[in-house]
């Protein structure tokens, strides 16, 4: 009888446990998982070991609890508390508060103001995610992460976007219900996810609308159809990313938990 089996042929409970999970994600020449997490800003190696031991870390869909696993930081898909950890430091995603009068392109052929002026100091080749028309202000994302950009713009992921609009006239009490039920436009029906009246007077109203539509000029066309033309429009959120107090023409890098929540929203 070998040391690893009992009389009935069963494996002994005293056999040393492997540090690797049942579906092996261990890369022998990789980097220890706790070191990777520490380098990504999740605290000291000791703190990262505690995250692993608590089952709050997964690699390639496998929950980690044992220490000793090594991973390839460039290929492993790592989540902490359900949020994706971006380990490729060559990828960057930036939030920009687009001012009015700026066109949503990185190089305007007619020489009109475009987005490139706000990231002229970046070495990466960035492209914009989605568009805002020239007179609409607010949040737009710039990135060199092709997978993230594709998913953010693909309709199947239904990423919600929030807009604040100033519209003509006093908004009737039942408008929110109509917008949620659906308004028929020339290219199909559009339904909003949420609608809130922030201010209203006989002359004008300020409203907040959430929708996951990506059609051109969709918010302006929607309110035109219901008799409240838009006079000012700003986008304030894209999924979990908020414009916040970012001033017009300013940018900030999206990283850490905020980036993780954005990637998780598109199932990365």
Image: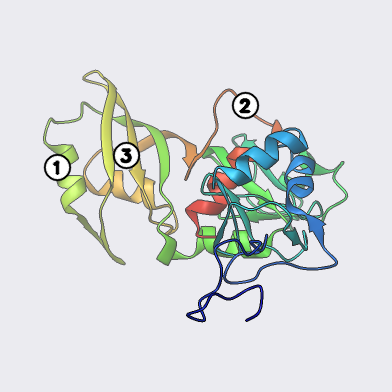
* Image x and y of residue 82, in percent: 51, 49
- Count residues near mark 1 (Cα–Cα under 10 Å), then give few for <14, some for 14-19, many for 20+: few
Q: Judge from the rendering whether residue 94 lies leftward or rightward of residue 74; answer left or right.
A: left
- Count residues near mark 3 (Cα–Cα under 10 Å), then give few for <14, some for 14-19, many for 20+: some
* Quadrant placement of the N terminus: bottom right
Residue for point 72% across, 45% down: 37
Q: Is residue 6 above or below residue 93?
A: below
- Whether label 2 touches label 1, CB < 8 Å: no
First along the sequence among labels 1 and 3: 1
First along the sequence among labels 3 and 2: 3
Circle nearer the viewer, 1 or 3: 1
> Which residue in the protein does label 3 denote?
229
Camera-nearest residue between 33 and 175: 33
First along the sequence among labels 2 and 1: 1
* Image x and y of residue 258, in percent: 59, 39
| Residue 132 can be seen, yes or no | no
Residue 246's label in the rendered image is: 2
């Amino acid at each position: 009888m070998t040391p690893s089996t009992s009389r009935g042929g069963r494996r002994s409970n005293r056999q040393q446990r492997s540090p690797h999970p049942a579906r092996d994600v261990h890369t022998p020449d990789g980097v220890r998982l706790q070191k990777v997490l520490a380098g990504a800003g999740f605290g000291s190696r000791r703190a990262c070991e505690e995250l692993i031991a608590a089952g709050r870390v997964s690699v390639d869909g496998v929950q980690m609890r044992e220490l000793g696993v090594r991973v390839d930081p460039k290929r492993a898909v790592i989540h902490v508390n359900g949020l994706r950890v971006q380990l490729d430091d060559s990828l960057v995603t930036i939030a920009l508060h687009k001012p009015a009068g700026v066109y949503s392109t990185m190089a305007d052929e007619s020489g009109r103001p475009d987005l490139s002026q706000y990231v002229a100091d970046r070495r990466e080749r960035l492209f914009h995610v989605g568009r805002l028309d020239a007179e609409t202000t607010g949040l737009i994302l710039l990135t060199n992460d092709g997978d993230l950009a594709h998913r953010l713009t693909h309709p199947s992921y239904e990423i919600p976007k929030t807009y604040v609009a100033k519209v003509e006239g006093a908004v009737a009490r039942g408008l929110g219900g109509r917008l949620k039920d659906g308004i028929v436009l020339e290219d199909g029906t559009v339904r909003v996810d949420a609608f809130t009246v922030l201010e209203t007077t006989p002359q004008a109203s300020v409203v907040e609308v959430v929708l996951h539509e990506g059609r051109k000029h969709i918010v302006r066309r929607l309110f035109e159809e219901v008799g409240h033309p838009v006079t000012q429009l700003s986008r304030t959120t894209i999924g979990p990313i908020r414009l916040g107090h970012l001033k017009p023409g300013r940018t900030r890098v999206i990283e850490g938990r905020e980036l993780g929540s954005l990637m998780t929203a598109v199932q990365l």
